Image: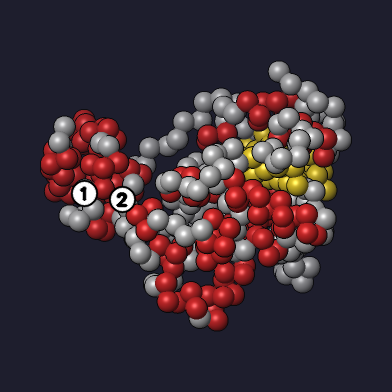
Amino acid sequence: MKCFGYVVVLAAILTVGSRPALAQQSMLERLEQASPQQIQKLLPRFPQADANQDGTLTRDEALAYAREKLGTPQKKPTTAGVRPTHADVAYGPHERNTLDFWQAEGTGPRPLVIFIHGGGFVGGDKSKWHNDKNLRQLLTAGVSCAAINYRFLQHAPIQDILHDAALAVQVLRSRATDWELDPAKFAAWGGSAGAGTSLWLASRDDLADPADEDPVRQQSSRVQAAVLNATQATYDLTRWDTFLGPADPSWQRNDQEQGLFYHFTSIEQLQTPEAQSVLRECDMLSWIDAADAPVYVSNPGPDRPPTNRGEYVHHPAHAREIQNACDACGVVCHWQQSPTPCEFQDPLAFLLAEFELNEARE
């Protein structure tokens, strides 16, 4: 179907909320089948559908906007797979501040791996881990697991999203007794945005506040190991040019993208003292020091000048920069694509070694 057809569909959705549910569902299904290019062409007509105002109308944003206009509830993600011991546990005030928890069999406190989904901080869901083989293998090895959701950029700036993840760690640690967890053996595991968040958790100085009246806030936000798949080295985006070179302007969603990442209204604001403090907070490379957890890094893309946005965001140079920062202060970094052979063949072996467990696989 030509793009015009999808414009008509969305226009109809805005004006025919009283249509029968079957007709509404048919409209949503047609929107789900539209190509990214067709969805993007809807943006000039429906700019309010671009929830994070980044200049790119994603399928999720278009569907969310359409469902809101129709009064149709958001479709819940599938949860087939390993059933959590505790599902959709709230760890914060926002509707996306939820986590799932799987308790491993065995006696005594168990290590914990916290899975963090990717999606560019604009999409994704913790349900992706329900069918993940690594979750099953960790449970078999006696490692409990959790998977978290967090706010998207349409809800909060990156600096607050990172603190969502820290709060999730604190909530999980506060339940160590009830859920039989070893608070000294927490690890984070993520891909892309989830990997960068995991690196931030592994490097950010502890956010525990012993003087806080909330006992959760008194808990440590630190993790003792991190697995980083297709990670970014830092969320101070102004540093990327130094190790990646300049990005092609066509890869940016709009010319204010860097500022919008932190919810600033312009790139010029990045030069203000307020912005410099925010950039420092989001800069994992600057946080790395000798007290940090070991990391396992895998960025397997082509190690040449990037040719598109995806290569730029997940380039091996991110992993190289992490390894350089770790080497400079004595933090253990296992980079799978390093010229030096990696000690571990995969992240599961790395974590089981860190947790001092015998390797167990299906």
- Residue at the image position 53 percent from the left and 45 percent from the top: 304
Foreground pick, 274 / 80? 274
Q: Is residue 244 above or below residue 348?
A: below
Residue 217 appearing in the image: no
Q: Amino acid at mark 1?
A: Leu
| SS at circle 2 | loop
Q: Quadrant of residue 16?
A: top left
Q: Is residue 274 above or below residue 5?
A: below
Q: Amino acid at mark 2?
A: Leu
Q: Is residue 280 above or below residue 8?
A: below
Circles 1 and 2, Cβ within 8 Å, touching? The answer is yes
- Residue at the image position 42 percent from the left and 72 percent from the top: 267
Residue extending furthest toward the top: 362
- Residue at the image position 65 percent from the left and 60 percent from the top: 284
Residue extending furthest toward the bottom: 273
Tell which circle, 1 or 2, labels the residue nearer the N-terminal end.
1
The numbered dot on residue 42 is 1
Report the colour scheme: secondary structure
What is the quadrant of the N terminus in the image? top left
Q: CA distance from mark 1 to mark 2?
A: 8 Å
Q: Residues within 10 Å of mark 1 (few under 14, many from 20)?
A: many
Query: Looking at the picture, how far across and down is residue 150, in whole percent?
Result: 53, 51
Foreground pick, 210 / 361? 361
Query: Looking at the picture, how far across and down is residue 75, in whole percent?
Result: 38, 37
Foreground pick, 106 / 270? 270
The numbered dot on residue 57 is 2
What is the quadrant of the C terminus in the image? top right
